Image (cartoon, grey):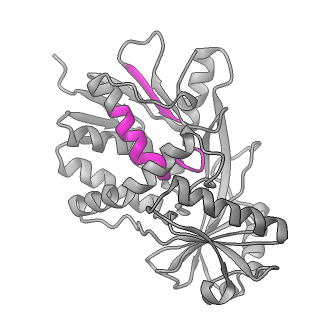
Amino acid sequence: MATVDLTVRGAGIFGLATAWTALKRGANVRVIDPNGAGSGASGGIVGALQPHTPDVWNEKKQFQLDALLMAPDFWHEIEATSGISTGFAKAGRLQPLAGEREVVMARARSKGAAEFWGNAAIWEVIEADAAGDWRPPSDTGLYIHDTLSALIHPRRACASLTAAIKARGGEVTTQGDDDGAILWATGWKGLGDLNTAFGKLMGTGVKGQAALLHHEAAGRSQIFAGGIHFVPHQDGTVAIGSTSEREFSDPHSTDQMLDDVVRRAMELMPVLKGARIVERWAGVRPRAKSRAPLLGAWPDRTDHFVANGGFKIGFGVAPMVAQTMCDLILDGKDAIPDGFRLTA
């Protein structure tokens, strides 16, 4: 008889979040990762939880909306259980508008937000004075402001989840046996295994580089400008990033590409000029071919399941990924959106 109901292979955000949700449902859970919890892309430093634009609605956007609405209760319960801050804050986001075309599009999307987000959050166009002094320049003097975006400190969130799982009686270990159902949440290298098993491209890894600056901006909105994320963490740092590199030789090295991101970030936000760089980080994020997460039962492997491919949106969708996978694994309920479905 199995001593564990669910074995999770991979202690990144999808694996840890699913393990936590399964424990809450009464399952016995073991998480195994030979490199330790949060050792891959989920142990990064940026943590921008952002919605897709509220127009041309589809199941992916609905899934993400549901996850972002779940996030406050999800992360606050984890913090209460572990006693460790995740850095979660529903801080909103600012985006400068470069020209009239962008302004017209942004105003149209505010109507989409009213329709699809309802009263849950706002997407609006605001003037510079309303944006406050924590803002990049805008050629039009206008900005998109949304209240659905949130932020988190990925590395601390993984540490908090790990402690919460252990506090609830679950295991998080670097080695162990596979008992019960098995969930493969093994990141970009796991996508390589899927490529081999399926005989076709299911996904690949995309390297990202980011930096953490010493600058106090806690409580301010995150910013997306010039292709760069600015995430003001609650610990007196600001994360900036990141690059997207399809080709790379060293997954963990930082180089001139990050130097360029830091330079451009300080040009966009002069308040950051001269800020000390606390950390330079690089890691590889799992990108499914469809850019949507890959979820579902592993064909031809009884009681094996997959949750992978959370490229750029992993922390944002994690609460819904965890719920969906637990519905499938523990209850036999398949509520996976068609666009996320793992198929041979």
Q: Is residue 38 visible?
A: no
Q: Which image quarter: residue 290?
A: top right
Residue at the spot x=39%, y=25% of the render? 334
On the image, the x and y values in percent for residue 147 come to 51, 68
Q: Quadrant of the N terminus?
A: top left
Extreme residue toward the top, this view: 300
Q: Nearer the viewer, residue 156 or 177?
A: 156
Residue at the spot x=31%, y=29% of the render? 7
Q: Quadrant of the C terminus?
A: top right
Q: Where 22 sits versus 140, above or below?
A: above
In the image, the segment drawn in magenta is 304-326
On the image, the x and y values in percent for residue 215 come to 56, 84
On the image, the x and y values in percent for residue 340 come to 54, 31
Q: Is residue 89 left or right of residue 274?
A: left
Q: Where 31 sits versus 149, above or below?
A: above
Residue at the spot x=45%, y=25% of the render? 296
Residue at the spot x=67%, y=48% of the render? 207
Q: Which image quarter: residue 16?
A: top left
Residue 310 counted in the magenta span: yes
Q: Nearer the viewer, residue 125 or 313?
A: 125
Q: Is residue 187 left or right of residue 37?
A: right
